[in-house]
Amino acid sequence: DGGITQSPKYLFRKEGQNVTLSCEQNLNHDAMYWYRQDPGQGLRLIYYSQIVNDFQKGDIAEGYSVSREKKESFPLTVTSAQKNPTAFYLCASSTPLGRYTFGSGTRLTVV
Amino acid sequence: GQQVMQIPQYQHVQEGEDFTTYCNSSTTLSNIQWYKQRPGGHPVFLIQLVKSGEVKKQKRLTFQFGEAKKNSSLHITATQTTDVGTYFCAGGNAGNMLTFGGGTRLMVKP
């Protein structure tokens, strides 16, 4: 079955530490996205990539970085510059008509 | 930039009552999509509307796209406890980028 796999499901980060969240898709989608969701809130766009080797900042890119070296993979690094990283992180990919498929998410907690 | 507003933010209903959430865009949309996120889960695609004035039904769910393609609604008839979750609308323009509304959280009392 095609889909998006995010790992890990839960992640704990110490103050000042960089962590990388994995996102892999086998849907053959060109476009991929990273969203942040805080409790009881909506989805805020962090970064997106429309094609391999290219990506753009979203609304809240500060403190985050991404890469898109392969079509299937779009990892997100939460850097120490992100002062409030505790949140639920969702990766998505989309068809050319814009229908999104989301991964099951990673819950990041700062300890 | 484009903004998509969704109301209400929260809605408590008694099981069996109807529920409606509304979505308004600051710009004309090429399409509107609806997603459902169960508590603790991830958003799941429900439907896409493309045509002006379009109405689509999925069992007890009725989706509408406004004539001006700037607003949409989701109506659930006779809610059930399985309808609990947050419903997001998402507006699309040229290309495949979506702008998500803030979501409506539906709580159903049995």
Image: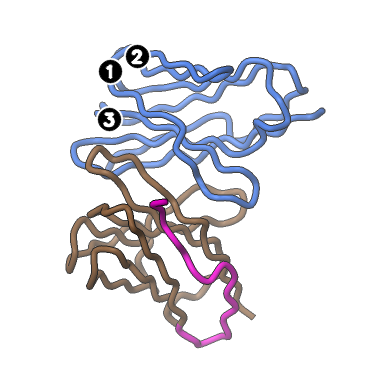
Chain colours: A brown, B blue
Q: Which is more foreground, mark 3 or mark 2?
A: 2
Q: Name the residue carrying label 3.
A: B27
**In the displayed structure, would residue B110 be above or below residue A105?**
above
Chain letter of the residue beneath label 2 in the structure image: B
Q: Position of residue A26 (x, y in %)?
A: 33, 58
- The chain letter under disc 3 is B
The kind of secondary structure element at disc 1 is loop
Q: Which mark is residue A44?
A: none
Dot 3, crowdedness within 10 Å: few (<14), some or many (≥20)? Answer: some
Nearer-the-camera pick, B52 or B4:
B52
Q: Is residue A93 magenta?
A: no
Residue depicted at 33% across the width and 40% down the height: A99
Give the CA distance from mark 1 to mark 3: 15 Å
Q: Is residue A56 above or below residue A3?
A: below
- Considering only order in the chain, which callout, 3 or 1, is on the residue closer to the N terminus? 3
Disc 2 designates what residue?
A: B54
From this viewpoint, which residue is outermost toward the right? B110
Q: Chain of mark 1?
A: B
Specify start and end residues of the magenta stretch as a single range: A1-18
Find numbered disc 3 in the image and state the secondary structure of the residue it sits on.
loop
Image quadrant where residue B61 sits: top right
Q: Name the amino acid type tagged 1.
A: Lys
The answer to the question of whether label 2 and label 1 lie on touching residues, with beta carbons closer than 8 A, is yes
Identify the residue position indicated by label 1 in the image: B51
Instruction: Left or right? Give the position of A60 relative to A56.
Output: right
